Amino acid sequence: MKQIKYIFSLVAFMLASTFAFAGDFGDVSLDQLQKAIDSDSVTIIDVNGSSSYAKGHIPTAIDFASVKDLSSVLPEDKNALIVAYCGGPRCGAYQKAAKAAQKLGYKNVKHLSAGISGWKGAGLPVEKQ
């Protein structure tokens, strides 16, 4: 009986950890993000650091590490789509930018869980600096 309780507790903990890692931000697909870029209806935040950003980032993305005042680079419309990304599906660094945008009052903050690795892996274009 103790083993069953232990296993149940372990499974419950693992599920809770998975949901906690996922954060409060909905995911956006590569296709959805590309369409939003094409229609100029998204602000993208790259959280991979300035060195990675310089080597290649999603077109129009903002280098979060180099921004001193996030509110100065985000749109006035608090309902505008904001998408944050980092390295890939297992990276949680995007949350820093997503939470910062949310704290500024933005209500439509999303996460590109595929990250830059998924973007490049899909053969989508990157910008370099």
Image (spheres, helix red, strand yellow):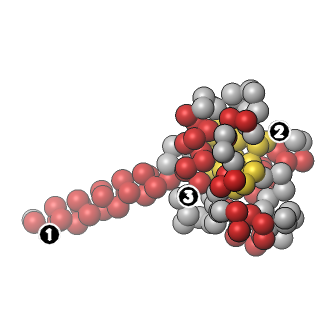
Q: Give the quadrant of the C terminus.
A: bottom right
Q: Are marks 2 and 3 in contact (CB under 8 Å)?
A: no
Q: Position of residue 33 (x, y in %)?
A: 77, 51
* Mark 2 vs 3, N-terminal side: 2
Residue at the disc numbered 3: 93
Residue at the disc numbered 1: 3
Which is more toward the observer, 30 or 83? 83
Q: Pick out the residue farthest to the front.
A: 68
| x 67%, y 40%: residue | 70
Q: Quadrant of residue 51?
A: bottom right
Compared to residue 108, the image places residue 96 above or below, namely: below
Q: Position of residue 39 (x, y in %)?
A: 89, 42
Tell me if I can see residue 72 in this picture. Answer: yes
Q: For numbered disc 3, what is the local secondary structure? A: loop
Residue at the disc numbered 2: 41
Callout 3 amino acid:
Ala
Q: Quadrant of residue 78?
A: top right
Callout 2 amino acid:
Ser
* Mark 3 surroundings within 10 Å by alpha-carbon count, few (fewer than 14), some (14 through 19), many (20 or more): some
Callout 1 amino acid:
Gln
Q: Position of residue 14 (x, y in %)?
A: 35, 61
> Is 40 left, or right, of 122 in this rendering?
right
Compared to residue 101, the image places residue 67 above or below, namely: below
Which is more toward the observer, 36 or 8? 36
* Mark 1 vs 3, N-terminal side: 1
